[in-house]
């Protein structure tokens, strides 16, 4: 029996089994399916093939869009400016792509006059939260459907359903992991990794070599930043896509960029996650170092606090929140001064910044030097120390009897003559 027709749905389509099965399934729910495949630098199959696959599974229209530059400009660079790493470790490569996917889905839905959008996330992850929160914020009139969360198929039932609806079932062995990747990094979960005691097998990694197998020679890379964003490598201007690709390869070959963490999910449980993000981690490292040269002390301090908020908002699906907008404006305002060149040394799993220079440097050699050319007025230190120490001195004068410092007792009890 044919269901009552409800209108169009725009499905975020990767070409994988889940979203392929979603095409006939959504059709059976009464929707005409428009697929939207987004190129964000993932190691995807041939995009033409994905398009053909969408039509074969019953799509009425199949879009394939290259969003790599949009992803970098509107999501990756803002995140680099904020040195964004969730829980101090994860550079948010997967999390960053979700608000863009949501934005593209809504864009396509409006263009197509669709009543709904759909994604292939399960009900257990946070990607469903990020995509749905973003879609609802951007256009609450468009319904968001999550077929994989709703259909309740077991793996076998899904395969049977696929076969019955002429959706090609993958012939290759299913990867033992759940992978999500784009140009900012690769996320690897599930399978053997679910036990935090198991060490990640080498086959989990694609972009990085084991540091022990990395070349014995150091590799030097000089990255030039303008307004907080990398623009050239070793003096050569590169497009943002080329530059990230170059850094992924160079750092990855040196065994740099692996992450193995237990992370706190938004949906309430801890999960063991493995990532490889050679470009993201090395660029963040370089950028953070350049900021120490170019930003004022109090700006750096406040920025650090807001970087944590930026990372949390990205992780937690609040990309389009008003606070995020304000925090991004703050970040942009600081980045006007983050210009210069950073020299990085890659060596067996390490990325070491060992030199930097900048026209907007606020490091003053004349103030810092202990050699000739010193302009620091050492006599001014006398007055500075007097006033800086005044509050503590006053307090201690008043509370003499309450000397809580145990050093006297410690010296009495444990002090030994060090010359004997
Ligand atoms: N845990 C990461 C995050 O929530 C990565 C999720 C990536 N998805 C995947 N299927 N591996 O941002």
Image (cartoon, rainbow, N blue to C red):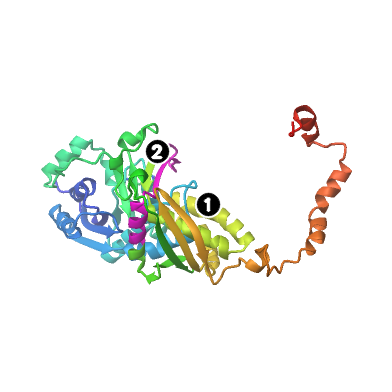
Element type at mark 2: strand
| Part of the protein shown in magenta | 244-272
Would you identify the image quadrant in which residue 170 lies? top left
Percent x, y of residue 204: 30, 42
Q: Is residue 265 a member of the stretch shown in magenta? A: yes
Q: Position of residue 128 (x, y in %)?
A: 36, 47
| Nearer the observer, 177 or 281 | 281
Residue 272 tag number: 2
Identify the residue at image location x=27%, y=44%: 148
In terms of depth relative to the viewer, which is nearer, 254 or 225? Answer: 254
Q: Is residue 172 left or right of residue 81?
A: left
For mark 1, give the secondary structure: helix
Q: CA distance from mark 2 to mark 1?
A: 21 Å
* Res 103 seen here: no
Whole-percent x, y for residue 298 in the image: 64, 60
Residue 308: which numbered mark, if any?
1
Q: Would residue 79 appear left or right of 62 to someone viewing this image?
A: right
Residue occupying the point 30% across, 55% down: 117
Determine which quarter of the picture holds residue 68: bottom left
Q: Earlier in the sequence, mark 2 or mark 1?
A: 2
């Amino acid at each position: 029996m044919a269901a009552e027709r409800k209108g169009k749905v725009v499905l975020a389509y990767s070409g994988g089994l889940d979203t392929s099965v979603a095409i006939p399934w959504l059709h059976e729910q009464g929707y005409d399916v428009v697929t939207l495949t987004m190129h964000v630098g993932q190691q995807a199959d041939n995009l033409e093939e994905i398009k053909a696959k969408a039509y074969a599974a019953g799509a009425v229209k199949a879009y394939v869009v290259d969003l790599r530059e949009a992803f970098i400009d509107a999501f990756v660079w803002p995140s680099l400016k904020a040195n964004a790493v969730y829980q101090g470790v994860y550079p948010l490569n997967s999390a960053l792509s979700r608000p863009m996917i949501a934005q593209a889905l809504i864009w396509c839905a409006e263009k197509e006059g669709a009543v709904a959008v759909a994604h292939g996330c399960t009900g257990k992850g946070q990607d469903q939260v990020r995509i749905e929160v973003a879609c609802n914020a951007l256009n609450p009139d468009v319904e968001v459907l999550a077929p994989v969360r709703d259909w309740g198929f077991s793996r076998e039932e899904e395969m049977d359903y696929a076969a019955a609806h002429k959706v090609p079932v993958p012939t290759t062995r299913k990867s033992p992991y759940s992978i999500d990747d784009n140009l900012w990094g690769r996320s690897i979960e599930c399978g053997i990794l679910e036990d935090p005691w198991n060490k990640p097998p080498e086959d989990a990694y694609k972009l990085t070599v084991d540091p022990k197998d990395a070349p014995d020679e150091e590799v030097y890379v000089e990255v030039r930043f303008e307004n907080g964003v990398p623009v050239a490598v070793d003096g050569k201007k590169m497009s943002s896509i080329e530059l990230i690709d170059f850094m992924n390869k160079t750092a990855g070959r040196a065994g740099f960029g692996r992450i193995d963490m237990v992370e706190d999910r938004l949906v309430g449980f801890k999960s063991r996650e493995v990532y490889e993000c050679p470009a993201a981690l090395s660029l963040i490292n370089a950028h953070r170092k350049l900021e120490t040269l170019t930003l004022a002390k109090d700006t750096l301090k406040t920025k650090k606090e807001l970087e944590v908020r930026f990372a949390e908002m990205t992780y937690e699906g609040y990309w389009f929140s008003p606070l995020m907008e304000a925090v991004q404006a703050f970040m942009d305002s600081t980045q006007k001064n983050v210009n210069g060149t950073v020299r990085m040394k890659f060596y067996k799993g390490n990325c070491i910044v060992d030199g930097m220079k900048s026209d907007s440097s606020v490091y003053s050699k004349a103030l810092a030097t202990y050699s000739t050319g010193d302009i620091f007025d050492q006599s001014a230190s006398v007055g500075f120390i007097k006033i800086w120490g005044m509050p503590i001195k006053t307090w201690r004068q008043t509370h003499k009897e309450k000397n809580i410092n145990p050093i006297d007792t410690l010296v009495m009890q444990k002090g030994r003559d060090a010359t004997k």
